[in-house]
Image (tube, helix red, strand yellow):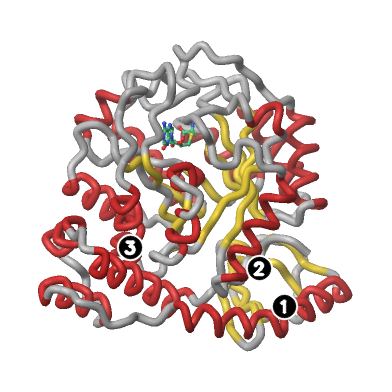
């Protein structure tokens, strides 16, 4: 690694990546781990050489597989769709009308061409790296009453809260035993975790050398600032929908403007920002989805996070229909066209639609994935939506299935395992 003005340059098998120097004491020539553009830990030489040895051949093999799967094949497609995809290839911005035309596509061969073009764009701009973050759901208490969410305040579910020490213990297991380099700490909007508790949690986990994401909803700006100072470097906070009317209907007592303002504020503090929306909310149109994609981009999202609505029992939306899988895959592809270099997540909600969708999403432009590391006794109570794909999965088994899937499609999950 080389350093200039707080920005380091990491050499990874000849590829150079810029990172924010967030660790005291890292020097030129050190071996380091970086996550989301943030340096999180120096690595002793022996461990680093072992890791590099493991990746050396695999890295180039995986790239070959990825390049092969990222080819775009000829298919029978209307000239209008071809013209839109040609714009993508020329790196020109799509108009809302273009995006709307893509949402209207239903022919399998045209869908295939859209997904292949998105996958090829992902490969050209981002290569084959794939983030695999752990997510720890530490409390299902929530002061809000969002109509879509199974842990809303008025839901009569059994509630739990992990103590500070329990959170630390589980984070330690995820980092030291399972090898995660990035961890999302998620909960309902639970003010039992005040500034003091959150700062302590973040400080202690940061020492483990891991990128900490917090996903705790609308808390005060002051709290987000203190938690940043304690060492959290990323925030997952969705705006849920760009349609104000739908927002205000589904999130009583909360304001769209305030949520957007908070996302902008955390971005301005220097947090890596993951934001996005739910696909398939009642009353939503393709135009809303297009606005959602454009809003995600305009907020400067480093990571796009969206997934289908999974109607949750006991909520006002329990009888809603699941959105069409192709709609979600198209949303991934169009997000990739709109924001070529971003990370785009395949979320657990998408996997809940059916088991194949994780792979399909990754081949339609996505390049990030999360693995649940919540202990099973709590995971079964964190029911924001039912039949969560990861509900019964053993964590180690889930990591293996995920890395096997990524290897099979030529992706390098360089931030997990080993
Ligand atoms: N309390 C935090 C974390 C919320 S849970 C916050 O407010 O940010 C994480 C996400 O799950 C939510 O942002 C929402 O987009 C999604 N979600 C909630 N209920 C859902 C459902 N029934 N189907 C799909 N996604 C849902």
Residue carrying label 1: 55
Q: Earlier in the sequence, mark 2 or mark 3?
A: 3
> Which quadrant contains ligand 1?
top left
Tag of residue 148? none
Name the quadrant of the N terminus. bottom right
Residue carrying label 3: 333
Compared to residue 187, the image places residue 361 above or below, namely below
In the picture, measured across the screen, residue 410 lies left or right of residue 322, that is right
In the picture, measured across the screen, residue 68 lies left or right of residue 261, that is right
Compared to residue 234, the image places residue 416 above or below, namely below
In the picture, measured across the screen, residue 209 lies left or right of residue 148, that is right
Name the quadrant of the C terminus. bottom right
Query: x%, y% of residue 8?
Result: 62, 74
For the residue pair 410 and 154, the one nearer the viewer reads as: 410
Question: Element under label 1?
Answer: helix
Q: Earlier in the sequence, mark 1 or mark 3?
A: 1
Q: Earlier in the sequence, mark 2 or mark 1?
A: 1
Counting the numbered discs, the total is 3
Query: x%, y% of residue 13?
Result: 66, 85
């Amino acid at each position: 690694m080389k350093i200039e003005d707080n920005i380091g340059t990491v050499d990874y098998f000849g590829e150079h990546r810029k990172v924010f120097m967030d660790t005291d004491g890292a020097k030129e020539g050190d071996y380091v781990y970086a996550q989301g553009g943030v340096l999180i830990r120096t690595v002793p030489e022996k461990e680093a050489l072992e890791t590099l040895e493991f990746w050396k051949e695999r890295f180039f093999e995986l790239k070959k597989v990825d390049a092969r799967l990222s080819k775009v094949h000829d298919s029978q497609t209307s000239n209008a769709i071809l013209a839109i995809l040609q714009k993508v290839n020329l790196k020109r911005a799509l108009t809302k009308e273009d995006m709307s035309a893509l949402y209207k596509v239903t022919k399998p061969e045209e869908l295939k061409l859209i997904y292949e073009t998105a996958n090829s764009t992902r490969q050209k701009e981002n290569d084959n790296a794939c983030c695999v973050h752990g997510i720890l759901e530490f409390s299902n208490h929530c002061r809000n009453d969002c109509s879509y969410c199974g842990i809303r305040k008025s839901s009569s579910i059994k509630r739990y809260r992990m103590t500070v020490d329990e959170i630390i213990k589980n984070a330690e297991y995820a980092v030291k035993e399972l090898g995660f380099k990035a961890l999302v700490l998620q909960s309902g909007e639970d003010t039992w975790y005040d500034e003091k508790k959150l700062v302590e949690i973040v400080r202690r986990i940061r020492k483990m050398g891991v990128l900490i994401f917090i996903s705790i909803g609308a808390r005060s700006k002051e709290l987000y600032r203190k938690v940043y100072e304690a060492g959290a470097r990323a925030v997952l906070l969705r705006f849920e929908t760009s349609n104000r009317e739908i927002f205000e209907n589904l999130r009583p007592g909360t304001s769209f403007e305030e949520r957007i303002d908070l996302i902008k504020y955390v971005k301005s503090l220097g947090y890596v920002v993951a934001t996005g929306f739910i696909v398939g909310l009642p009353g939503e149109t393709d135009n809303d989805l297009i606005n959602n994609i454009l809003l995600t981009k305009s907020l400067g999202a480093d990571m796009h996070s969206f997934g289908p609505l999974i109607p949750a029992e006991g909520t006002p939306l329990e009888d809603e229909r699941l959105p069409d899988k192709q709609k979600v895959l198209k949303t991934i592809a169009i997000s990739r066209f709109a924001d070529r270099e971003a990370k785009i997540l395949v979320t657990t909600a998408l996997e809940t639609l059916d088991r194949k969708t994780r792979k399909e999403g990754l081949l339609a432009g996505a390049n990030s994935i999360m693995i649940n590391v919540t202990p099973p006794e709590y995971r079964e109570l964190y029911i924001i939506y039912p039949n969560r794909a990861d509900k019964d999965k053993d964590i180690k088994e889930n990591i293996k299935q995920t890395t096997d899937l990524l290897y099979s499609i030529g992706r390098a999950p360089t931030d997990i395992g080993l």
